[in-house]
Amino acid sequence: MDFTFVEKIENDGVCYKLLRSNFYKGYYLIIAQDKRDFYSGSVFGAKEDIHSLFCEIAESSTPPFALRDILYDFDKQSIR
């Protein structure tokens, strides 16, 4: 799959990256990585909503292991 880098934020020893899918319109990949753990997950939504979610995750120093549940809740909330 092909992605375009959007943004990177480092906070409290965790690196967060936001990438946009070039193949599936409206899909993004959020990556959280520290020295001991790594998680990446895809999420679908409007650019503004995903960027807001990404900034909230990074600013709150969310650990990589918690990212899965956050993205799952966001997807569940977005389904109508």
Image (tube, rainbow, N blue to C red):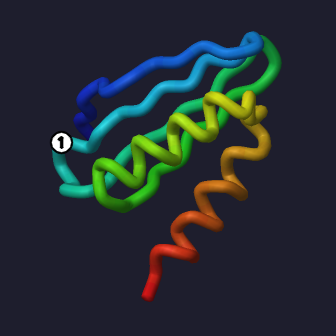
Q: Residue at x 67, y 16 (%)?
A: 11
For this rendering, which residue is in front, 47 or 16? 47
Q: Residue at x 55, y 75 (%)?
A: 77
Q: Which quadrant would the N terminus be assigned to in this image?
A: top left
- Whether residue 67 sits left or right of residue 28 in the image: it is right
* Residue type at numbered disc 1: Asn
- Whether residue 1 sits left or right of residue 52 in the image: it is left
For this rendering, which residue is in front, 5 or 2? 5
Q: Label 1, on which residue?
A: 22
For this rendering, which residue is in front, 10 or 1? 10
Vertical placement of residue 11 versus 32, above or below: above
- Whether residue 71 sits left or right of residue 44 in the image: it is right
Residue that sits furthest to the bottom in the current view:
80
Residue 28 image point, x, y percent:
36, 46
Q: Residue at x 74, y 28 (%)?
A: 61
The quarter holding residue 15 reads top right
Vertical placement of residue 52 versus 31, above or below: below
Mark 1, Cα crowd under 10 Å, few <14 / some 14-19 / many 20+, is few
Residue 24 image point, x, y percent:
22, 55
Q: Residue at x 48, y 26 (%)?
A: 17
